[in-house]
Image (cartoon, rainbow, N blue to C red):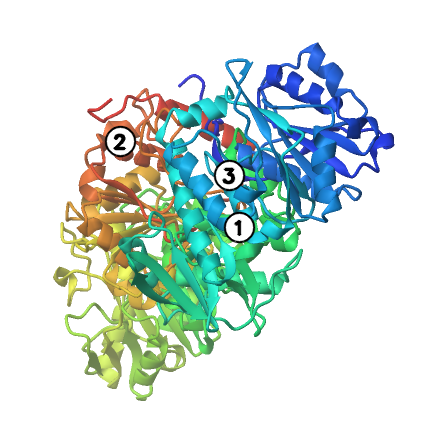
C-alpha cells in the first residue's frame, strides 16, 4: 500500500450538504430594478447553452431593462468556450455556481435565489437545451400574468428533434388546463401514449415567493409541479397560447436518458393516477390540505385524513410505522388511526389547529423535538417547513407520517439535526441542506455549516449526560485514621529488586477503610550473608527506592538501623539485660537488633509490623481489620495479635492462644508496645559474641512464665500469605500476589501460612456468551468508573468482564475491586506487575481466559463507555442470527459530526474502511483463525505495540462469515487522546505496514 493515506479517497457520492452557492459575477446596476428573471440552469451543456442564452439576450424585456438573466452552473467540469464567455459578460447576466445534484434541485435553487432579490417579482424558466421562440415571447407571457394579477402563466412551445423543428405545436389551451376534469384527460392521454402532446410545463413564469417547488424525482418533475399548480390554483393561472414561448428540445441528455428506461413511463403513469385522484377530491369538494409525492391530505369533520398512493405504502411498512409510533411513546408526532380503504392505506388524526414554523424555530423546541425522537428510536427524514407545525401547546411536531419515518440510525439522526439546524437556527431555505451527489466529504460538508458541530455535540451530550457528568474524584482514599497504630514494614538489602512493588502492595492493601498514624519503612543495613538468602544485597538501590516511596507519599518515614555499638548495647541492655554484645544478628544470622531498635522508635501504643514479602488478601474492602485486632488486645494479658491466614470458611474465628502457646507473629502481627515494654528486660542467652534468640522467641518464653498471650484468629475477610524465599522466583508468583490481593486464592492455599505454589494459581476462566475486554494502563479512576457504570446500566446482565491493567502499579490499581463492586463476581481482574503490551494482553484474554469458541468478545477501552443500556440484548440477538463480527456506532466528542460506518467489501484496499472503529465485537473462534505471527512486525521480531484496532479487526473482517453493523443510535463514547504529530506519523507508518500484509481471506 505505497499510496496509503489517513483518509479514504474522495468519491462522487450522495451526502448531506449545502448547495455551495457561489456568485461568480452579478448583473450590472442598470438591471438592478428588473422585475423579471430568466432562469437558466445547466450542467455541461455548453453548446445548447449558447443558443438558449442568445435567445434570452434578444428578449424585448432585456432591452428595456425590465428583465435580467441568471445562469446557474451545476458543477460543470468543462472549460467555457470564448463565445459563451462573451455572452456571460453581458450586463444583464448574473452567473452562479453551485452543487445541486439534479435538474429539480437546480430549478429550486433558482427559485430560492430569486426570492432573495428585492426587486424581482417573476421567474421565467428556460432550460439550457431550449430557446425562447421569439424576441417578445417573454414579454407576452409576463404581461398575460401581470394583467390578470395571476400567480403564474403558462405558454406554448414548439418541439425540436434531431435539430429540426417539428410541425406539431404544443399549444397551451385554457379549456384543457384550467379545469381539473380536462386536465386529467390530457394527462391520461399522453401518459398512456394516445397522444404525443404533453403538458406545456416548461413554458412557465412564476411569481416570486410563491413557495411551490419541483419534486426531486428523476423524470417529469416539471409535469408534477404544473399539475399541482393547476389543480390547486387554476383560477390564478394565466394561459398564454400565443405568441409561442419556447422551442423545447427532445434531444436533451436527460430527456433521452429518461425515455430509454422505465422511469419515464412509470412517472407518467403515476402522474395520471394522481391527477385522477386529485380531480376526484376536488369534485367532492374536499378541503385539501396538501398534495404530496406519496399521498393527498384533506380535512374531514375536524379530522386530518391522508390517503397514500398504491405504490407508496405497503402493509409491511404500515406495521413498521405502527410499531415505531406506538401509543406508549412520547414523540412529537400526532397519534393516528390506520385503515385500509379500497385497497389503499390511509390514516386519520384529530385536527387541533396549528402554527406553521416561520423563518426560524426556537432552539428550545428543536432540542426538545430531537431529544424525544432519539430516545424513542424514531427518524423523521423529510424535514422541511411544510412538514412541521407548532402545536397549540407550543411543541414542534412532525406531521408528514409516511415512508420517511424510519427506525433511527446515527446517520438519520445527524441528518435530522443538520436539517433542523439549517432551517430553524440559521433560517436557510428548505432545500439548502439536502442529500445530493458531491465530491465533498460528508464531515467536511457539515463542518462548513456554521456552528453545527458545536450544536450537534451539545445535543449528543444532552442525550447522554452519563458520558460527561461523572465524578472527578480520583482514587478512593482511607475513610478514617487510627492514631494509635503505626505500620512498620521490615526490609533488608536483598529486597532491592522487589521493594517498591511490595511496599506499594502492603500499603495499598492495608490502608482502607482505615489508615495508620504513620507508615514507616524499617531498613536492616546488613550487607553480609542472610538467613535463607534469595538475592544479592543492594543497599544503595534499596535506600534510593525508599526515598522515592517517601517522596511519593506512600510511606511517612524511613528508619535505617544504626551501627553505632553504643546504641546497640544500650538497646540490648534495655530488652535483654545484655550489655556486652554488639552483633546485630543472632547466632543463626536472624535479624535482632534492627527490629527491636525499630520498635523503640515507634511513638504509638501499637505497631502493626510485617515482613516486606507478605502477601495480603482482601475479600472485602469494607472490613476494618484493625478494629478487630485492637479488640483482641483488650484482654490485659494479650501482648500480640497475629494477622489472619486464608480460611476455607467465610466466618469469624475466635481469637485464641494460651500463655506461651504462640509466639508473637514476627512475619505479620499487631504488638501492644506498652505492654511489651512493661515486660522488659526478658531473657535472651548469649553464645560467644551473639545472642541466641530472636525477639519474638525470647518474648514467647517470657510470656509462658508470666501468663501472657499472643493470639490468633479473626475475620476471614482479611488475611496474609507468606512466600518462602525459595519460591519467589516461580513464574506463577506474580499471579498469586494479584489473586491473593483480590481475595481469590485457590482452595489449596486455605489454612496455610506459607504460599503453596502450583498450577492452581490461575485467573478465572470466562464462559459467558458475551465477555467485555477492558484493557488499559494508568486509566483515570473517574473514566474507568464511567466505563464500569455503563456496564452496570445494561438491562441484561448476562455477560462477563476481563479487566486488564498493564502494570500501572498497586498504588494506582489497588482500588479496582472497589470500582467493580457488584461486577466483581463476573469479572476476571488481571493486574500485571510488568508491562506486557497490547497484543499479548489480547492473546491472554481471548485465547486463555475465554473458553467457549462462540463467546462474543466486546472490546471496551477503560476510558470509554457504552452509550445505550440494551447493548447486550442487541449483541445476543445478532449472535443468535449468526453474526460472528459485529460493530456498533461510535461517537467521538472531539469529532462530533464524523460517522464511522464500516464497509466490509475490500476494506484493506480502502485503508481499513472503518472496520477498526468501536464498538468492536467478534467471536473467540474468529480471532483464533488469525496466526499469532500476523500480529508481529514484518521482520517477525516484535509485536505491533499500537494500532491494534486495525491489526485485529482488519483480518477478522476479511475472515468473518457474517459481519454485521448494528445501528440504532450511538453505542460507544470514544474520546481519543492526542498523542502528538510524531506518534501519529508513527501510527500511520504502522498502519501502512499492516495494510500491506496479505489478506487471510480465501476470496482474495
Label 3 sits on residue: 223
Residue positioned most to the right: 30
- Which of discs 2 and 1 lies nearer the camera? The answer is 1
Residue nearer the viewer, 241 or 398: 241
Which mark is first along the chain, 1 or 2? 1
> In which quadrant will I find the C terminus?
top left
Label 1 sits on residue: 231
Q: Is residue 567 visible?
A: no
Q: Residue at x 15, y 45 (%)?
A: 853
Label 3 sits on a secondary structure element that is helix
Query: Callout 3: 10 Å neighbours few (<14), some, many (20+)?
Result: many
Residue nearer the viewer, 98 or 870: 98
Spatial separation of the CA atoms under disc 2 and disc 1: 56 Å
Residue 369 vs 878, above or below: the answer is: below
Position of 764 compared to 125: left or right? left
Label 2 sits on residue: 958
Amino acid at each position: 500500500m505505497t499510496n496509503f493515506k489517513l483518509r479514504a479517497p474522495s468519491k462522487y457520492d450522495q451526502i448531506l450538504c449545502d448547495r455551495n452557492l457561489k456568485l461568480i459575477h452579478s448583473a450590472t446596476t442598470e438591471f438592478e430594478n428588473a422585475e423579471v428573471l430568466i432562469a437558466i440552469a445547466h450542467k455541461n451543456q455548453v453548446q445548447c447553452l449558447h443558443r438558449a442564452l442568445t435567445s434570452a439576450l434578444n428578449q424585448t424585456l432585456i432591452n428595456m431593462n425590465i428583465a435580467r438573466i441568471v445562469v446557474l452552473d451545476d458543477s460543470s467540469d468543462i472549460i467555457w468556450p470564448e463565445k459563451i464567455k462573451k455572452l456571460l459578460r453581458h450586463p444583464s447576466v448574473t452567473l452562479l455556481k453551485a452543487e445541486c445534484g439534479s435538474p429539480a434541485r437546480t430549478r429550486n435553487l433558482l427559485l430560492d435565489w430569486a426570492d432573495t432579490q428585492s426587486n424581482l417579482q417573476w421567474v421565467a424558466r428556460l432550460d439550457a437545451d431550449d430557446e425562447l421562440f421569439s424576441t417578445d415571447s417573454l414579454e407576452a407571457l409576463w404581461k398575460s400574468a401581470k394583467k390578470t394579477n395571476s400567480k403564474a402563466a403558462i405558454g406554448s412551445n414548439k418541439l425540436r428533434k434531431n435539430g429540426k423543428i417539428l410541425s406539431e405545436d404544443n399549444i397551451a389551451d385554457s379549456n384543457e388546463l384550467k379545469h381539473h376534469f380536462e386536465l386529467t384527460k390530457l394527462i391520461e392521454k399522453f401518459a398512456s401514449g394516445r397522444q404525443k402532446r404533453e403538458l406545456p410545463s416548461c413554458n412557465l413564469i412564476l411569481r416570486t415567493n410563491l413557495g411551490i417547488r419541483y419534486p426531486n424525482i428523476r423524470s417529469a418533475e416539471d409535469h408534477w409541479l404544473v399539475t399541482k399548480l393547476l389543480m390547486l390554483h387554476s383560477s390564478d393561472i394565466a394561459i398564454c397560447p400565443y405568441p409561442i414561448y419556447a422551442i423545447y428540445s427532445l434531444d436533451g441528455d436527460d430527456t433521452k436518458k429518461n425515455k430509454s428506461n422505465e422511469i419515464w413511463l412509470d412517472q407518467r403513469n403515476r402522474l395520471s393516477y394522481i391527477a385522477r385522484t386529485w380531480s376526484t377530491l376536488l369534485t367532492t369538494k374536499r378541503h385539501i390540505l396538501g398534495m404530496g409525492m406519496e399521498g393527498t391530505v384533506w380535512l374531514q369533520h375536524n379530522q386530518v385524513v391522508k390517503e397514500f398512493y398504491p405504490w407508496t405504502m405497503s402493509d409491511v411498512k404500515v406495521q413498521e410505522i405502527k410499531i415505531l409510533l406506538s401509543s406508549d411513546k412520547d414523540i412529537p408526532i400526532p397519534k393516528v388511526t390506520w385503515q385500509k380503504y379500497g385497497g389503499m392505506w390511509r390514516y386519520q388524526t384529530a385536527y387541533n389547529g396549528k402554527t406553521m414554523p416561520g423563518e426560524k424555530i426556537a432552539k428550545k423546541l428543536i432540542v426538545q423535538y430531537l431529544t424525544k425522537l432519539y430516545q424513542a428510536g424514531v427518524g423523521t427524514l423529510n424535514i422541511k417547513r411544510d412538514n412541521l407545525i407548532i402545536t397549540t401547546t407550543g411543541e414542534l411536531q412532525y406531521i408528514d407520517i409516511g415512508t420517511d419515518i424510519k427506525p433511527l440510525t446515527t446517520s438519520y439522526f445527524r441528518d435530522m439535526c443538520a436539517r433542523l439546524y439549517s432551517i430553524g437556527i440559521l433560517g436557510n431555505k428548505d432545500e439548502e441542506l439536502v442529500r445530493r451527489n458531491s465530491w465533498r466529504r460528508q464531515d467536511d460538508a457539515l463542518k462548513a455549516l456554521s456552528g453545527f458541530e458545536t450544536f450537534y455535540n451539545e445535543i449528543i451530550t444532552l442525550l447522554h449526560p452519563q458520558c460527561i457528568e461523572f465524578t472527578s474524584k480520583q482514587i478512593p482514599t482511607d475513610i478514617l485514621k487510627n492514631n494509635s497504630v503505626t505500620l512498620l514494614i521490615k526490609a533488608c538489602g536483598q529486597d532491592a529488586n522487589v521493594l517498591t512493588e511490595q511496599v506499594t502492595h502492603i500499603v495499598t492493601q492495608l490502608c482502607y477503610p482505615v489508615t495508620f498514624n504513620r507508615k514507616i519503612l524499617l531498613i536492616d543495613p546488613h550487607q553480609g550473608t542472610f538467613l535463607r538468602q534469595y538475592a544479592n544485597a543492594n543497599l544503595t538501590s534499596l535506600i534510593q527506592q525508599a526515598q522515592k516511596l517517601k517522596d511519593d507519599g506512600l510511606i511517612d518515614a524511613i528508619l535505617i538501623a544504626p551501627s553505632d555499638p553504643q546504641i546497640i548495647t544500650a538497646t540490648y541492655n534495655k530488652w535483654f539485660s545484655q550489655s556486652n554484645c554488639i552483633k546485630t544478628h543472632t547466632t543463626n544470622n536472624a535479624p535482632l537488633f534492627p527490629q527491636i531498635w525499630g520498635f523503640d522508635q515507634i511513638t504509638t501504643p501499637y505497631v502493626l509490623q510485617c515482613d516486606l514479602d507478605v502477601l495480603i488478601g482482601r475479600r472485602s474492602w469494607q472490613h476494618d481489620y484493625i478494629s478487630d485486632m485492637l479488640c483482641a488486645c483488650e484482654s490485659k494479658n494479650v501482648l500480640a495479635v497475629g494477622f489472619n491466614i486464608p480460611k476455607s470458611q467465610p466466618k469469624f474465628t475466635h481469637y485464641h492462644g494460651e500463655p506461651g502457646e504462640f509466639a508473637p507473629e514476627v512475619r505479620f502481627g499487631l504488638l501492644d508496645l506498652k505492654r511489651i515494654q512493661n515486660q522488659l528486660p526478658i531473657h535472651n542467652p548469649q553464645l560467644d559474641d551473639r545472642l541466641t534468640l530472636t525477639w519474638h522467641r525470647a518474648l514467647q518464653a517470657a510470656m509462658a512464665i508470666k501468663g501472657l498471650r499472643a493470639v490468633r484468629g479473626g475475620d476471614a475477610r482479611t488475611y496474609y500469605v507468606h512466600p518462602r524465599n525459595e519460591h519467589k522466583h516461580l513464574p506463577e508468583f506474580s499471579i498469586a500476589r494479584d489473586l491473593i490481593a483480590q481475595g481469590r486464592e485457590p482452595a489449596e492455599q486455605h489454612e496455610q501460612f506459607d504460599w503453596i505454589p502450583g498450577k492452581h494459581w490461575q485467573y478465572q476462566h470466562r464462559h459467558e456468551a458475551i465477555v467485555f475486554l477492558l484493557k488499559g494502563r494508568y486509566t483515570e479512576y473517574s473514566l474507568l468508573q464511567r466505563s464500569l457504570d455503563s456496564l452496570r446500566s445494561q438491562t441484561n446482565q448476562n455477560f462477563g468482564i476481563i479487566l486488564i491493567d498493564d502494570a500501572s502499579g498497586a498504588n494506582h490499581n489497588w482500588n479496582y475491586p472497589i470500582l467493580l463492586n457488584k461486577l466483581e463476581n463476573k469479572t476476571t481482574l488481571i493486574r500485571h506487575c510488568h508491562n506486557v503490551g497490547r497484543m499479548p494482553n489480547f492473546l491472554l484474554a481471548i485465547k486463555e481466559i475465554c473458553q467457549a469458541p462462540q463467546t462474543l468478545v466486546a472490546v471496551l477501552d477503560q476510558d470509554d463507555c457504552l452509550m445505550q443500556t440494551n447493548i447486550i440484548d442487541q449483541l445476543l440477538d445478532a449472535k443468535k442470527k449468526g453474526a460472528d463480527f459485529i460493530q456498533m456506532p461510535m461517537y467521538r466528542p472531539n469529532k462530533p459530526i464524523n460517522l464511522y460506518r464500516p464497509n466490509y467489501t475490500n476494506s484493506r484496499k480502502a485503508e481499513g474502511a472503518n472496520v477498526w472503529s468501536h464498538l468492536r465485537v467478534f467471536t473467540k473462534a474468529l480471532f483464533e483463525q488469525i496466526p499469532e505471527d500476523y500480529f508481529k512486525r514484518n521482520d517477525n521480531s516484535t509485536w505491533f505495540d499500537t494500532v491494534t484496532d486495525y491489526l485485529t479487526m482488519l483480518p477478522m473482517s476479511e475472515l468473518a462469515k457474517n459481519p454485521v453493523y448494528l445501528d440504532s443510535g450511538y453505542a460507544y463514547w470514544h474520546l481519543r487522546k492526542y498523542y502528538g504529530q510524531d506518534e501519529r506519523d508513527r501510527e500511520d507508518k504502522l498502519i501502512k505496514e499492516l495494510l500491506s500484509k496479505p489478506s487471510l481471506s480465501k476470496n482474495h
